[in-house]
Amino acid sequence: MQQTSSREVYANPWMSVREDGVRRDDGSTGVYGVIDKPNYALVIPFDGNRLHLVEQFRYPLGMRRWEFPQGTAPDRADVEADVLAARELREETGLRAASMLDLGPLDVAPGMSSQRGRVFLATGLTEGAHEREHEEQDMRTAWFSRDEFEKMIAAGDITDAQSIAAYALFLLHERRRAA
């Protein structure tokens, strides 16, 4: 597929939306709507037994959801993934990590968004004060055992696709380490 035109139809400090004209391999033409967001980092805080999650109101869904700390830099800035991961962890939970291991990439919704992310495993955690953004003022945090976390997924209490996919990367990492 080849891009033949592009125009921005909307932008704010967190994202932009563009409409691209495209030509397919067979010569037919069409349009493609793309949501452009900066890359994000997702952090799995793990103390050796428990996972630390955040819960916040997700406006598009109209409900509160539990998930791993994650986010992008303000004003669509391009920030190195490891720096962003440490910032998101500190900002949302107050935790600081002695070690941040890159577990791999995730694509948010490749059929409609250019956004990509990196998953980090945070260990050697120490507690401190959170530094939340204004939009995160209703955020709560809590520790959960792995069994509780998996039960929450099975019950539909954790539905964030990025958190569930990140947990799969975590499990693969543990399996490789044990082998």
Image: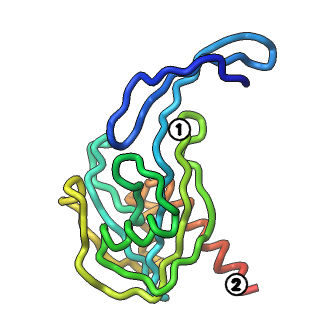
Relative to 137, 166 lies left or right: right
Q: Residue at x 76, y 85 (%)?
A: 179
Q: Earlier in the sequence, mark 1 or mark 2?
A: 1
Q: Residue furthest right?
A: 26
Q: Which label lies toward us, 1 or 2?
A: 1
Q: Which residue is mark 1?
A: 113
Residue drawn where x is 24% and y is 69% of the image: 131
In this figure, which residue is indicated by the disc labeled 2? 177
| Number of numbered callouts drawn | 2
For this rendering, which residue is in front, 170 or 23?
Answer: 23
23 vs 8, left or right, is: right
Q: Secondary structure at mark 2?
A: helix
What residue lies at 27% left-to-right and 43% top-to-bottom?
59
* Amino acid under disc 2: Arg
Residue drawn at 80 percent across, 19 percent down: 25
At label 2, counting other C-alpha atoms closer than 10 Å, the crowd grade (few under 14, some 14-19, many 20 or more) is few
Q: CA distance from mark 1 to mark 2?
A: 33 Å
Q: Are marks 1 and 2 in contact (CB under 8 Å)?
A: no
Where residue 172 sits: x, y (%)?
67, 72
Farthest residue to the top: give it: 28
**As drawn, 81 above or below 14:** below
The quarter of the picture where the N terminus appears is top right
Counting from the top left corner in percent of width and height, residue 129 is at 23, 78
Helix, strand or loop for disc 1: loop
Residue 134 location in percent, x, y?
19, 56
Q: Position of residue 74 (x, y in %)?
A: 34, 52
What amino acid is labelled 1 in the image?
Ser
Q: Nearer the viewer, residue 177 or 145?
A: 177
